[in-house]
Amino acid sequence: MIIYLNMGENKRCLMVIILIQAINAGMFLLSKAAFNAGMNHYVYIFYRQVAATVFLSPLAFFRRKVTPPLTFFTFCKIFCLSLLGIAICLNLYGIALVYTSATLAAATSNCLPVITFFVALLLRMEVLRLKSIAGAAKIAGILFCIGGVAILAFYNGPQLNLFNNHHHLFPIHKPNNNHHSSSLPLPNSWLMGCFLMLSSNTLWSVWVVLQALVLKSYSSKLQLTNLQCLLSSFQSFGIAIAMERQPHKWKLGWNLQLLAVIYCGMMTAVTFCLQAWVIEKKGPVYLAMSTPLALIITAFFSAIFLGESITLGSTLGGMLLVGGLYFVLWGKNKEQTISETLKEGTKEGNDIEEGKDITKVEQ
């Protein structure tokens, strides 16, 4: 904690996004184990959001005195935010898994930085200066990210069996589509699955970008997260009750499914708060560019605990994704440094922006 407090803001944000993606990787592994055990996806999302709300509500209650006033218009924005970015987004993601495969899901999720960047660019929340070094670095990072995703999706290569001698922590079963949707059987269509997966990723990107706008009018990150978890619980319940009517699918016992709900609910609340903090400090693109880290962390721990093989394609793709992340973060930090210098009105800042020689300007 002392080391964290002594760090600068850039290093703090970097540590926080690494923590967020490490938590997301843990939630992915535990959720996967729960689905393998037969838990319904719609019911799982509802229970997870309820657990997140129960975890956050006491904290939000004790902080209510320092909470800014909530107007009806702001409440409507938060309602739409939770509906699009949590309830619909997560359920579309679950349906898409029925149509496609986990490999495609893992690959397409790494398109989030690119989608988020273009959404922020359209809403004029992100600036792209092609003639500057920072702008070129951001473009190079995005191209690296696209290349890494392409390798992950279309190239496997030889297997690197580094950890397969370890015992499996969770049993591996073939996924059963009935676990995801038992009420409305859907035709098997890869194209439809790709469309739904892309729609889910786009909604997540829009959710991340719009949070930055909502935080300007409602600055309490804890209350914003709590409200989103609470509203998404009701919204997810409506979706779940419409998609799953069998009572035995809603039962929870003292097993892995209950552990997944409690742990992932608590960690959802924590990551939402941390994400809001990063968005407020660095913007939505900075957060989205960290999503490839979750794939790398997940692949590493899947190889250890689930005995899955790491392929050469996933290794090369992960290296490109990390390289793309570094270039974009460097470009954003460079632009932030220039912007802060210009705001101070110093001659050095003007020279950096215009590329002029300081000595000649002083003369």
Image (spheres, rainbow, N blue to C red):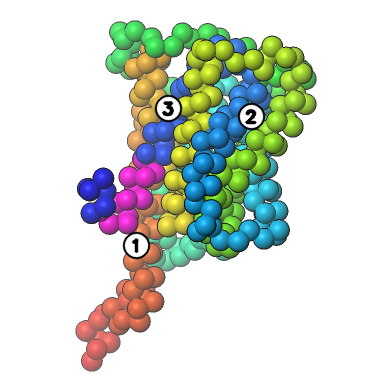
Q: Toward which corner of the image does residue 23 lie, by quadrant? A: top left
- Name the residue located 65 percent from the left edge and 23 percent from the top edge: 43
Read off the magenta span: 7-18
Q: Look at label 1 and name its amino acid.
A: Lys
Mark 2 Cα within 10 Å, few/some/many (few <14, many 20+)?
Answer: many
Mark 3 element type: helix
On screen, 9 above or below 359?
Answer: above
Q: Look at label 3 and name its amino acid.
A: Gly
Q: Toward which corner of the image does residue 137 lie, by quadrant? A: bottom left
Marks 2/3: CA distance? 19 Å
Q: Look at label 2 and name its amino acid.
A: Phe
Mark 2 element type: helix
On screen, 205 above or below 212?
Answer: above
Residue 329 vs residue 27, the one in the foreground: 27
Residues at badges 2 and 3 in contact (C-beta under 8 Å)? no
- Name the residue located 64 percent from the left edge and 15 percent from the top edge: 251
Marks 1/2: CA distance? 42 Å
Return the x and y of residue 61 as percentages of the image width and height: 53, 47
Q: Which residue is denoted by mark 2 in the rendering?
A: 46
Q: Toward which corner of the image does residue 231 lie, by quadrant? A: top right
Return the x and y of residue 298 as percentages of the image width and height: 41, 27
Q: Which residue is denoted by mark 3 in the rendering?
A: 26
Residue 254 vs residue 209, the one in the foreground: 254
- Name the residue located 27 percent from the left edge and 57 percent from the top edge: 8
Marks 1/3: CA distance? 32 Å
